[in-house]
Amino acid sequence: MTRAAILNVTGYAGAELARLLHSHPGVELVAVTGRAEAGKKLAEIFPHLRQIDLAVGERVDESVDLVFSALPHTSSAEGLIPFIRQGIPVVDLSADFRIKNSDTYRRFYGVDHPAPELLGGAVYGLPEVTRKPEQGARIVGNPGCYAAGALLALAPGVAAGLFGADIVIDGKSGISGAGRTLGQPYHFAEANDSVSAYAMEGEGHRHRPEIDQELGCLRGKTSKPVAFVPHLVPLTRGILTTVFAQVVRNVAQAELMDAYCSFYEGSTFVGVVESPPSTKQVAGTNNCLIHVRASDASGKAIVVSAIDNLGRGAAGQAVQNMNRVLGLPETMGLEQLALYP
Ligand SMILES: NC(=O)c1ccc[n+]([C@@H]2O[C@H](COP(=O)([O-])OP(=O)(O)OC[C@H]3O[C@@H](n4cnc5c(N)ncnc54)[C@H](OP(=O)(O)O)[C@@H]3O)[C@@H](O)[C@H]2O)c1
């Protein structure tokens, strides 16, 4: 049984990870940390986690086998460095081990990376897209939630050489994507019954560079950055992504479907579906549903993907990555079906 710990269990991502690990047959959750809530029982903070008999600690000792971090960026790398130095595998839900280039990290996150020398050894944890073996990896950078939805939607078309450089991404996220920390745009009276775009100024949203980075890996070269606009929608969970990708030649619907179905053949979590998916169809899961359409008139392909930002966008993906690092069956602990209605 693997002994796992979560740094910062008191945010949405950390709490969802604790929920998933509780029913994982190959893992025992042995330690969780938090700052303001240190010393309290987990069940006092999160009554929905009452079956987990753990107190929130201030730190984790190095007797654990694997560490997840759901800390904010920068604090996350700093918190993980002692474990990395001990050779303990880590899965980081923050942005700290996603971007390979420390200058890009500084440009988008406004701070120097605390350990740029570790970036080269980190694996970008979106296995259906990167196709890299995580087994034996010591550092996995879990993708950003918007990036996961966008990359899963784009990868088959890009890998097949069907999509050119002109790509527009419209992402719509539920409010838990902004975390548990209070902020005016997330108050019920501000967010309910309303939809808004954000992060349009300057170079745009922080998830864009990781999308560009991973599309570059699929193409074997860097190309024009994608255009990406995120939106806040009045949902608790879920990200619906619509991508508009220029096709390099006339591509029939059947060819596009073939490219998508064969790219995801054998994948338990990613499904190519006949009609546009909704976020409800993936709520509480690590799944991603994708619908793809060739649009002759516009010269574009249109792809829609649905994920749960706390599932495939965070904790579910982290568990899938842990399974791969440990050499466990990839779906272990992630077999639950979506909540409905
Ligand atoms: N929410 C999502 O959908 C999602 C998806 C993918 C990835 N992520 C990533 O997961 C991480 C956690 O996100 P979240 O949405 O769960 O956050 P969150 O709900 O906003 O949680 C933030 C928690 O972090 C603690 N905290 C804040 N600053 C800290 C610091 N400097 N050091 C230690 N603890 C600090 C706060 O608790 P105390 O004040 O009690 O310490 C707060 O409860 C972030 O890196 C985020 O980018 C989130």
Image: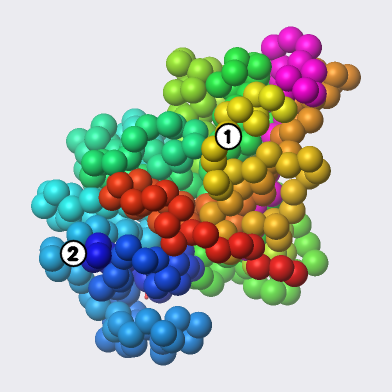
Label 1 SS = loop
Quarter of the image where the N terminus is located: bottom left
| Label 1 beta carbon within 8 A of ligand 1 | no
Residue 248 lies in the magenta stretch: yes
For this rendering, which residue is in front, 145 or 132? 132
Q: Are marks 1 and 2 in contact (CB under 8 Å)?
A: no
Residue 151 spot, x, y in % from top left:
56, 36
* Residue indicated by mark 2: 64
Q: Where in the figure is residue 21, as x and y percent of width and height?
A: 39, 67
Q: Nearer the viewer, residue 94 or 4?
A: 4
Q: Under 8 Å from ligand 1: the CB of mark 2? A: no
| Outermost residue, top side | 249
Q: Magenta residues?
A: 237-256
Q: Is residue 245 magenta?
A: yes
Q: Is residue 142 left or right of residue 147?
A: left
Residue type indicated by callout 1: Tyr
Q: Residue at x 41, y 89 (%)?
A: 44
Res. 204 image quadrant? top right
Residue under pointer 1: 264
Seen in the picture, residue 339 relative to 269 is either above or below; the reply is below
Circle 1 crowding by C-alpha within 10 Å: few under 14, some 14–19, many from 20: some
Q: CA distance from mark 1 to mark 2?
A: 34 Å
Residue in the image at 61% along x and 27% along y: 262
The residue positioned 29% from the left and 84% from the top of the image is 55
Q: Quadrant of the rendered structure where residue 79 is? A: bottom left
Q: Who comes first in sequence, dot 1 or dot 2? A: 2
Residue nearest the viewer, comparing 228 with 331: 331
